[in-house]
Image (cartoon, rainbow, N blue to C red):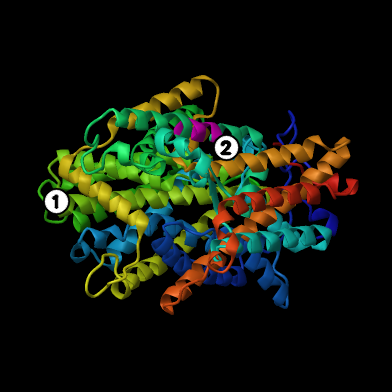
Amino acid sequence: MADEQLKLPENAYRELEPGETYTPVIPHEAGVLEVTLRSVGIGLLMGVIFSAAAAYIALKLGQGIESAIPISILAVGASALLARRSTLLENVNILAIGATSGILVGGSVFTMPAIYLLGLEHRSSFFQIFIVPFLGAVLGVLFLIPFRRYFVADMHGKLPFPEGTATTEILMTGERGGQQAKVLVSAMGLGFVFDLAALTFGAWRDVFTTSLVRPLHVLTDRVKAVFALNTSAAVLGLGYIIGVRYASIICAGSFLAYFVLIPLVAWLGAHMTGSMTAGLPPISTMSAEDIFSNYVRYIGIGGIFMAGIISIVKMLPVMVQALGKAFGELRKIFSGGLKQEGTSRVESDIPMGLVVVLTCVITVAIWIYFRFSVLAGMPNATRLATLSLVLTLVISFLFAAVSAWAVAMISVTPISGMTLTTLIVAAVLLARMGLTGQEGMLAALLIGGVVCTALSMTGSLVTQFKIGYWLGATPRRIQWANILGSAVASVTVTDMIMMFAAEYGYLRTAAHPNPLPAPQANAMAAVIQSVMSSTQAPWLLYGVGAAIALIVEMLGISSLAFALGMYLPIELNTPILFGALVAEYVRRRSPDETTRRARNNRGTLIASGLIAGGALAGVADGVARMFADWQHLEIVGLDHIRWLHRLDNWLGLAMFCALSVYVVWDASRARPEEGAGPEISL
C-alpha cells in the first residue's frame, strides 16, 4: 500500500460528527494477508514465552506483566528480519494470539496456587488446574462479542483506550518509519531506562510518599492521611493519554478513600478498645496502608460491584439487541446456515448464532466439570454444581462490562477485587447449602478461577477489538485467535504452576525453606478460609461502597471511574492525573490550531513510548529478579553506594517532575506539518 495510506485517519481518536464514519487504515475491501502460518507460529511462540515469564513474576512479585506491548514490539522487530516483511494485519494476529499469555496468568496464577496453600493438591490434577483458565478465557471471549461494536464503534472517541493507543502507535510506526518512529523509539528507550533505574537498581524510590516526610508525621501517624505518587514513566504516559476528565474522577475516588475514609476509620478505631474485626489487630495500631487494605478497599469493591450493576442497566438496550440478533441467527441455523450476509470484513464477528451455541457448550462443560470432577461423591452434588454454574455465569456476565470499561478508561482492571467478591459470595452461599471444609474451599476457589480468567479476557480483548477497529483487522479472526491462544497458554501456565510447586513450593516447609510468595493466591486462600469457617464478610463496607457509587452516578459522574479510584492504591492514580495535566498544558499553550494538533500528536507518541518502555522495564526487572533468585545473588541498589540514599524519596519526585518537563519540551518541538494525523480528545 502507498505510504499515505499507512496513516491513521484524522478522526481515529476523536468523537465522530453526525453522519461521519470511520474508515480503518486497511479498509474492508483491501486484500491484505492477515492469518498466515508465520503469524500463527510467531504468536504461539510469544504466548508460550510470555506465559512462562509472566507466571513466575506474578508468583514472585504479586503482579502480572504487560505482554501486549512487548509482543507488538517484537512482532515489528521480527518482521524486519524476515525476507518478507509481515503485513500490519499479520502483526495484529500475532498480538491477538500471543497476548493471551497475560490474560491466562492473571486468571490462573492469582487463584490456582491457593490449591496448594489450602492443602488441596491431593484433590486436584493437571486437568483440573488447566481447565479452569481455559473455560474462563473462552467464556470471556463469548461474553464480549455481543458488546464489541458498542465499545469500539458506538463509544468511538469517548473512551481513551490508553494501552490500545500505545500499541496501535507502535504497530503503525513499525510500518511507516520516519520521524515518528524516531520519536517513539527514543521515548521508549527513555521510559525503559527511567523505570529500570528505579525498579531494579534502586536509583530512587519508585513511589514518593509523605509518610517519609518527617514534618508531616502528625498527618501520617495520628490522622493517617498519606499522599503517594508512583514515579514510573509508564504511568505518566498513561495519564497523558487518558486525559483530565477520567483522571480527575479516578483521583477524586482516591482522595475520598485516603483523605476522608481512612482518617475516619482511624478516628473511630482510636475510640475503641480491642479489635473491630476478628483476627486483625486494633485499628489504632494500624498504618494508613493497613487501614486501606483491611477496611477501605472493601468499600471500593462494593462501589465496583454497584458500578457493574449500573453498567448492566445502561447496556440493557445493547443486550436486548444482541440477544435478538442471536436468536435470529439461531433460526437461520435450523433453516440452513450461519452466513453473515451483507457484513463487511471489518464488521464480521463470529456469528451470533454460533456464539450462543458455543456458550451453551461451555456452560454444559463447566457444569460437568463441577458435578463430576470438583463435587464428585458429595451429597446434593447436582444441586451444588448447578448453583456453582449459575454463580459463575452471572458474576462473569455482570463484571465483564466492568472489566472492559475499566481497561477502556485507564488500562487497569480490578481483577483481584472482583475475584475476591466472587469468592466471598460463592463461599457464603455454598457454606449455607452445607458445602464446607476442603470440598467447599475447592469449589469456591475454582468458581473464582473461572470468573477471574473470564474477566481478564474481556479486559484484554476489548483493547484488541479497538486496535483491530483502528487498523482494519477482522474481528472474527481476533476472536478465534484468542481462543486458540488460550488453549496453549493454559497448558503453559498450568505446567509452570505445578513445576514451581515442586521446585520452590508455596508454603514454607523443610523441603521448601524459601517458597514463592504468591501474594494474590495467599489473599484468595485467606478469604476462603475465613468465610468458610465463619460465613462472615464485610457486608457493611460493601454496602457503603455501593451507596457511594450510586450517589456519584446520580450526580452524573462515572461511578466506575470513581470506584476504581477508591479501590486502587493512591500512588497509581495521582501520577495519572499529573500526566493528564501535562497533556492539558501542552494543548493549551499552543499558539494556533495546527500547532496544537501537531504538539498533541507528538505528545501522544512520546506517551506511547513511555508506556512501552515502562512495560519492557517491568519485564526486564522481573527476569533480573528471577535470575538473581536462581543464582542466589542480590541485586544491589544504588542506595547502598551513594550518600543520597536518604533523599531517594524526594529524588524520585524530582525525577518524575523532570520527566514531565521533558515531555512538555519534546512535545513542543513538533512542527506544524505534523498535525495532519489523528488527535486524541482529552
Frontmost residue, 549 versus 131: 549
Q: Is residue 642 magenta?
A: no
Whether residue 225 is visible: no
Q: Is residue 252 magenta?
A: yes
Q: CA distance from mark 2 to mark 1?
A: 43 Å
Image depth: mark 2 or mark 1 in front: 1
Above-or-below relation of 287 to 57: above
> How many numbered circles does the render carry?
2
Question: Residue 159, how many percent across, how many down?
Answer: 62, 38
Q: Quadrant of the C terminus?
A: top right
Frontmost residue, 520 versus 471: 520
Start-end of magenta stretch: 251-257
Whether residue 83 is visible: yes
> Image quadrant of residue 84?
bottom right
Frontmost residue, 384 versus 345: 384
- What type is the residue that disc 2 sits on? Tyr
Which dot marks residue 437? Answer: 1
Q: Is 352 on the left-hand or right-hand side of 73?
A: left
Q: Quadrant of the N terminus?
A: bottom right
